[in-house]
Image (spheres, helix red, strand yellow):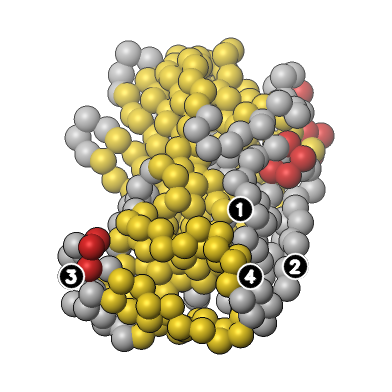
Amino acid sequence: MKRIGLIIAGIIGNLMLLSGQITLTYKTHGFRPGDSHDFVFMTPAQEGLSGPNVIWDFSQLETTQRSLTSHMLDISNAPQNENVSNANFVLEEFGNYFYFNNTSGSMEQWATISGNNILRYDRPIVKLKFPMSYGYKLSGNFNGVQTCSASCSTPVSGTYEIHADAYGTLILPNDIVIDNVLRVKQTRTIQYGQGNTITEVTYRWYSANVRYPVFVIIKYITPQQSYTSETAMYAHAGNHKKSATQVEQAANAYSSFEVFPNPFDNQFTLRLKLSNATKLSIDLYDISGKLVYTFYKQHRFAAGEQDLILATEKLQLQNAYYYLKINDGNQTWIQKIVKQ
C-alpha cells in the first residue's frame, strides 16, 4: 500500500528566546487556516537523546534540492470536503490532503486523500493534544478503510502514541541556536488488512516562538529494516519571517564570551564581558547532548569584564568534544570545546 505522511502534523544568527519551559497550546501552536510553513530537506539524521536539558547538534547537516510549503486550508477550500463530515480543517502537502477536526483541546485526523486513494477513519488518530508540555503522553487505537476504486477497499487499523519526550537546545546549520524547544515523539503502528505492518516514528521540535515545527525527523520500522525517511528544517528558523506566534526582544546582557585555552586539559577560562549585572547558568554537555555538569545555576555576575576559571579535573572527563552552554534566561550562547 502507498504510504502517505505529514511533515508538520506528525510524519515528517541566534534566535531571541522565551524563558521557562515551553508548553504547546491551541493559541500558540494550533493550526490556523490561511497559514503556510516552509521546509527545506536535509541529509538524514538520527534523533538523539530524550529527557530534560538535552543539546541536539544538527549543525553539520547539509540541505538537499528538495523543499516543501505546507498549506493550512479552510475545509471549504479542499477537494471532496463533503465526504468528510467530521473535519473542519485541511493540511495540504505535496498535493496530499489531510483532514482534521481541529479544536482548542486536540487535533484529530479523520481522513487522507491522495489522488484516487482515500483513507477514512471510523476512529481517528490524535495528532496533538493541548496543552502539552514535557512528559505528557497519550496513546490510543485507530481504524478505517482505504479505497482506490469501487473494487479496491482495504481495512486499516493500528495504534498511536504521542509523547513529549524531551526538551532542551537545538543547534541547526548556519549558526542557528534555538533554546527552550520541546520535542514531541509520535509513534504510529499501521496494519493494512491482514498484510503488512509498518511503524512510523516522527520527532518534531517546537519552539516557543514559532507556531509549527522548526525541525522534523521521520523514521520507518519494518520487519526487515529501520531507516530515516525524511529530515527537514523550518526554512526561516534564523529570522522568524513566517508563522511566529510572538518574538520577545530582550536586551543583550553581554557583549562577548571567550573560552581559552581550547583545547584544554584540566581547566579552562571563560572570559565574559557583561554590560549589566546578570544571572547566568553555565553548563557542560557531552557530544551526545547529555548534561555533564552545572558550573553555575542562575548565579548573579556583576557588570564588566571578568575571568572564570572552570576546573574539570574532578569530573574525570574523557578526551573528547564538549559543549559549554551559557544562558541568561533570554538568550543562549554555545561553544564547542575540546578536552585533550
The numbered mark, 2 or 4, whose residue comes first in the sequence reads: 2
Vertically, is 161 above or below 179? above
Query: As shown in the figure, which amino acid type bears the numbered disc 2?
Result: Gln
Quickly name the residue at label 4: 278
Q: Nearer the viewer, residue 304 or 113?
A: 304
Query: As shown in the figure, which amino acid type bears the numbered disc 1?
Result: Ser
The numbered mark, 1 or 4, whose residue comes first in the sequence reads: 1
Vertically, is 125 above or below 37? above
Separation of residues labelled 1 and 4 (CA atoms): 24 Å
Separation of residues labelled 2 and 4 (CA atoms): 16 Å
Separation of residues labelled 2 and 1 (CA atoms): 15 Å
The numbered mark, 3 or 4, whose residue comes first in the sequence reads: 4
Question: Mark 1, residues whose alpha carbon is within 10 Å: few (<14), some, or many (≥20)?
Answer: many
Q: Indicate the quadrant where residue 119 lies.
A: top right
Q: Indicate the quadrant where residue 299 lies.
A: bottom right
The numbered mark, 1 or 3, whose residue comes first in the sequence reads: 1
Quickly name the residue at label 3: 319
Quickly name the residue at label 1: 207
Vertically, is 133 above or below 256? above
Describe the element under mark 1 as helix, strand or loop: strand
Mark 2 against mark 3, which lies toward the viewer? 3
Mark 3 against mark 4, which lies toward the viewer? 4
Across and down, in percent, residue 67 comes to 54, 62
Describe the element under mark 4 as helix, strand or loop: strand
- Residue 249 disc label: 2
Mark 1 against mark 3, which lies toward the viewer? 3
Q: Residue at x 43, y 19 (%)?
A: 159
The numbered mark, 2 or 1, whose residue comes first in the sequence reads: 1
Across and down, in percent, residue 7 comes to 53, 46
Query: As shown in the figure, which amino acid type bears the numbered disc 3?
Result: Asn
Q: Residue at x 46, y 71 (%)?
A: 334
Question: Mark 3, residues whose alpha carbon is within 10 Å: few (<14), some, or many (≥20)?
Answer: few
